[in-house]
Image: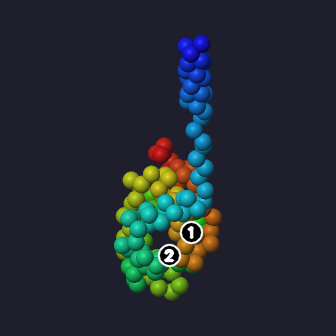
């Protein structure tokens, strides 16, 4: 009788183990807040040295990011600036900024989307997030 009980118990354990293995992993849901948090980390690493911790930029060199209409309005333009860099002399509120910005095309679509979503929701900006697909469309090539 002991052998039968042990056999049934062993089979039960095996069935439970098999059932647990077949359960799909819960799908990770990406939220705007998660994107913004990741973007903050990218900003610190890639952008802060020029645009400063507070997004204020450097007078006559690196433009401020706060309450900036180019950042708030035109997603394609700011994605393109991050991808291609910029060397134009830019007027913002009567002041010109002329320091060249290097291309950051080495960043992934996700990283660019995250950092721009962070900038578009920080420093007094209140714009929608940017998705990796929007970055991909501007980039024009596949890159994760």
User: Residue at 59% of width from left, 27% of height from top?
Assistant: 16
Residue 18 rendering spot, x and y as whole percentages: 57, 25
Q: Is residue 142 visible?
A: yes
N-terminal label among 1 and 2: 2
Residue that badge 1 annotates: 120
User: Residue at 39% of width from left, 81% of height from top?
Assistant: 58
Closer to the camera in the image, 115 or 61: 115
Left or right of 139, for residue 15: right
Residue that badge 2 annotates: 65
Secondary structure category for the residue under label 2: loop
Secondary structure category for the residue under label 1: helix
Residue 1 rendering spot, x and y as whole percentages: 59, 13
Closer to the camera in the image, 65 or 124: 124
Specify few, some or many for label 1: CA neighbours under 10 Å numbering under 14, 14-19, or 20 or more.
many
**In this rendering, is residue 2 above or below 119?**
above
Residue 104 rendering spot, x and y as whole percentages: 40, 59
């Amino acid at each position: 009788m002991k052998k039968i009980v042990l056999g049934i118990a062993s089979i039960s354990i095996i069935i439970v183990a098999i059932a647990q293995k077949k359960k799909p992993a819960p799908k990770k849901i990406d939220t705007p807040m998660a994107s913004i948090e990741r973007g903050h980390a990218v900003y610190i690493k890639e952008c802060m040295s020029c645009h400063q911790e507070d997004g204020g930029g450097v007078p006559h060199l690196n433009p401020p990011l706060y309450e900036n209409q180019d950042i708030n309005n035109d997603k394609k333009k700011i994605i393109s600036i991050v991808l291609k860099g910029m060397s134009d002399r830019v007027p913002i509120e009567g002041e010109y900024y002329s320091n060249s910005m290097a291309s950051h095309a080495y960043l992934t679509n996700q990283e660019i989307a995250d950092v721009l979503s962070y900038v578009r929701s920080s420093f007094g900006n209140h714009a929608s997030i940017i998705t990796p697909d929007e970055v991909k469309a501007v980039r024009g090539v596949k890159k994760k």
